[in-house]
Amino acid sequence: MRGISKILLFNLIAFAIGGCFEQPEYSDIPQIEFENMVYKRVDGIDSLTFFISFKDGNGDLGLETSETGCFLSGNDNLICFQGKVHALYRSSETGEYGIVDTGATCSGTTGCYTSKFIILKPDQTPIRYSDKRTNPEYANLPDMTKPYNCINWQRVFNNGIITDTIFIERNSDHNNFEIDFLVKNLNGSFTEFDFTKEFDFPNCGISFDGRFPILFSDRPGSPLEGVIRFRIGSPFLRTQFSLKTLKFRIQIKDRALNRSNIIETPEITF
C-alpha cells in the first residue's frame, strides 16, 4: 500500500468576550466539545470535516506555520524536554535545533514549536547510526527499522545521496491540534491506528495532527470561545479503512502548551 498523503484545512469561528459585557470565568486550560462530523468523497479525495467548540480563559490559542523555534524565558538556553533539562543549540547552516541532555530532571514545559530535535553528544556533534554500532554508550538506541527508521533516525542527503544518518526525537509540541484514528475490534474495543508507525520508508512518519492559526489577537488575555471547523483528507482513507468502523480522539493545546480535555467522536464506517 502506498503512503497516505494528507490534506488539512482549518476554518475558525471565534470571538473574544469583553467590552460592556461581564466576562465569563473560563479556565485558562482550553475546554473542547464535539459538535459534528461530516464525511464526503469529492474528486477522488476522502474528506472528513469536524466541528469542535472550545472555550479558553485567556484566549492564547493558535500557532502560525512560521512558528518553528524555541522561545526561552532566560538566556541560559536550557529547555525542559521529556522530563529532562537539555541545553539547546541551533545549527547556523541548517537552522535545525539540537539538544544535549544535562542529566537534570524537570517538570515544566518550554515553548518549543520545532518539529524535532537532533540529539547531540556532549561535544555538540550529532549521534550517528555508526555510534550505535561502535559505541556502547549508544548501543541501546533503537535499530533503524520500522517504525524507528522515520521516527528516530534522519537521513542526511547530499546531491540525492545519503551521506549520514543521525538520531532525532520528535517534538510533540510542534502541533496544537492532535487527532488519533481508533479502529473498532471484533470484541467492541478500539485500537489506535498510528500512521507514524504503519508504513515503511519513505512513506512512514506522517501524521494527521496539525495546527490552527491564532484565533484572536485584538484583545490578548480575553476569554475566547467559538468553533473550530477542520478537514482532513486523503485519496486513500476509504481504501485503508474499507468496511472498518472508526472513531476519532481529539485534543488541542494552547500557546503555553496546556492540553485541553480529550474528546471522542461518534463511530463512522466508510
Image (tube, rainbow, N blue to C red):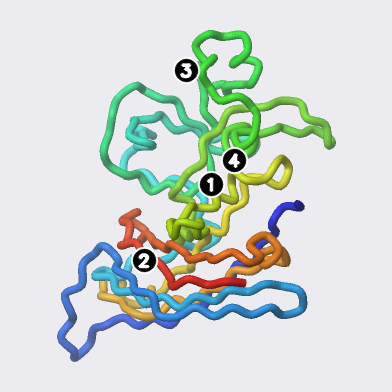
**Earlier sequence position, callout 3 versus callout 1:** 1
Observer-nearest residue: 106 or 214? 106
**Residue 98 circle label:** none
Q: Quadrant of residue 66?
A: bottom right
Image depth: mark 1 or mark 4 in front: 1
Whether residue 185 sits left or right of residue 75 in the image: it is right
Image depth: mark 3 or mark 4 in front: 3
Observer-nearest residue: 151 or 110? 151
Q: Which amino acid, mark 2?
A: Ile
**Earlier sequence position, callout 4 versus callout 2:** 4
Q: Which amino acid, mark 1?
A: Ser
- Residue projecting furthest to the bottom: 20
Residue 121 image position (x, y, % from top left): 51, 19
* Residue at 26% across, 75% down: 223
Residue at mark 1 to residue at mark 2: CA–CA distance: 24 Å
**Earlier sequence position, callout 1 versus callout 2:** 1
- Residue projecting furthest to the front: 187
**Residue 122 circle label:** 3
Residue 91 image position (x, y, % from top left): 58, 34
Residue at mark 4 to residue at mark 2: CA–CA distance: 36 Å
Q: Which amino acid, mark 3?
A: Pro
Q: Badge 2 is on which residue?
A: 263
Q: Residues within 10 Å of mark 1 (few under 14, many from 20)?
A: some
- When the figure is inspected, residue 81 is found, relative to residue 46, above or below; the finding is above
Q: Residues within 10 Å of mark 4 (few under 14, many from 20)?
A: few
Residue 135 image position (x, y, % from top left): 56, 9
Instruction: Tell me the SS state at disc 2.
Output: strand
Observer-nearest residue: 193 or 73? 193
Instruction: Tell me the SS state at disc 3.
Output: loop
Q: Which amino acid, mark 4?
A: Gly
Residue at mark 3 to residue at mark 2: CA–CA distance: 41 Å
